[in-house]
Structures are given as structure tokens and as C-alpha cells.
Image: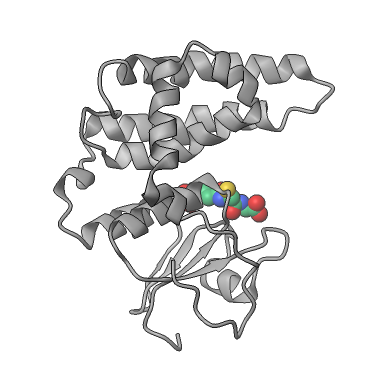
Amino acid sequence: MNNTLPVLYSFRRCPYAIRARLALKLAGVALDVREVALRDKPDAMLALSPKGTVPVLQLPDGRVLEQSLDIMRWALDQVDAAPWRMDDATGQALIALNDGAFKQLLDGYKYASPSSAQSAEHARDAAVELFVAPLNRRLAQTQNLLGETPALADLAIVPFIRQFAGVDPDWFLTSPFSAVRRWLDAWTHAQLFVSIMPRLDPWQPGDPPTLL
Ligand SMILES: N[C@@H](CCC(=O)N[C@@H](CS)C(=O)NCC(=O)O)C(=O)O
């Protein structure tokens, strides 16, 4: 590396990259963020992480973190932000459900062909039953997923619920999940979130660092 900043290969709308950027920003980690066009991934990124997904974080000591949750944990380890480290069994189980079965249904909902409204609805209803309704029951009791204090699980899950809400915003707005809407709105309008969503041109070798 020819600079001392960590480098994050990222994609603006990717929920995995969003959760990584949220944690890095929250931790106050200065970094060079490189926007990646997923159809034209930079060789420099593929050389570090041949699996070809974002986010990828290259640390100044040469370590490469290529899973969003590893990046989040590393980021929160850099600061003394005790409540944010909260990552108990419930939080871990919620994140596992989000990243596993819910993500699969979300993809089924988001990427259903326009001629197959039925399969989109089927995936949406299954996602609601599995995850969105239970989250709503939690959030009807407390501000955040694990209580009043924000936790790693909130940061890790909110980008995926944002994506779920965005598939059919009219449906979401009139759905009965008002506690999830309140939580999603609070997170996505927070300065932290807004600050990690700049629109960047895809990175090219030789570009100067872009600080997040
Ligand atoms: N398990 C990975 C998943 C990351 C992932 O799947 N990212 C998507 C974008 S949202 C990606 O890079 N896909 C590769 C592609 O579309 O070519 C993580 O947590 O970081």
C-alpha cells in the first residue's frame, strides 16, 4: 500500500457495504473508500480478495477483511464504545437470521420477474412472517432491537430492512409494521447514515484517496 489509511472497497447501495461503512464511521476510522462497479471490479480489489464481493477492507498492516461482519467487529474494537460492542446471543441470532433465510427471501422479493407478482408476494409474505413481524414486535417494546441502546445488530440489520422497504415503498408504508418503520426512519435519517451514503464515481487506479 502506498498510503497509511485503511482502504475500503465498497458499493453505495450494497447492504453489506452499508453496514461496514456505518460501523467504520461510528468508530471514527479514517479511511479511503473506493466505490466499485460490481460489473467491473478493480484488479486491485480482486488481487486482495478473489471472491469478488464487497465490502473488502485492506488494513495498513496488510491484513484483509473480506466479510462485512468482520469489518464491523474490527471497527468497533478500535473504539471504546461499549454499548456498541453488544453482541449477545440474541443479537447474533438476529443477524444470522437476517443474513441467512431473510436475505434469501428478500432476494426472492426484490428480484422476482415483473411477470411473477405472485412469487414476489409469496417471498414478501414469508419474509414478513419470518423476520419483519418479529422485529416489529421487538421494536414495539423498545427503541432498538436489543433494548433502548443501539447495538451491533441494529447497524447490521438496518440496511437490509431498508432494502426490503424499498422494493415496494407504498406497500411498506401502509403495512402494519409501524414500529419497524419508526426504527428504519430514525436510522436512515440519522447523520451517521446520511454521512456514509455519498454518491461517488467508481474508483480508478491513481485516484487520490476519498475520505469517508
Ligand atoms: N458475506 C459477504 C457478502 C457480501 C456480498 O454479497 N456483497 C454483494 C453486493 S451487495 C457482492 O459484492 N456481490 C458480488 C457481485 O454482485 O458481483 C459479506 O458479508 O461481506
Percent coordinates x, y for residue 38 in the rendering: 67, 58
- The colour scheme used to paint the residues is one colour
Which of the 4 image quarters holds residue 62? bottom left
Residue 104 appears in the rendering: no
Residue 148: which quarter of the image? top left
Drawn side of residue 85 relative to residue 168, left or right? left
Q: Quadrant of the N terminus?
A: bottom left
Q: Is residue 63 visible?
A: yes
Q: Closer to the camera, 104 or 188?
A: 188
Q: Residue at 59%, 59% (x, y): give it.
A: 199
Figure check: 181 above or below 32 = above
Residue lying at 45% horizontally and 24% vertically, measured from the top left: 181
- 147 to 10, vertically: above or below: above
Along the horizontal axis of the image, is 143 left or right of 192? left
> Left or right: 25 with respect to 113?
left
Q: Position of residue 205 (x, y in %)?
A: 62, 82
In this picture, residue 207 sits left or right of residue 81: right
Residue closer to the observer: 42 or 5: 5
Q: Residue at x 25, y 29 (%)?
A: 146
- Residue at the bottom extreme, as displayed: 2
In the displayed structure, would residue 163 be above or below residue 53?
above
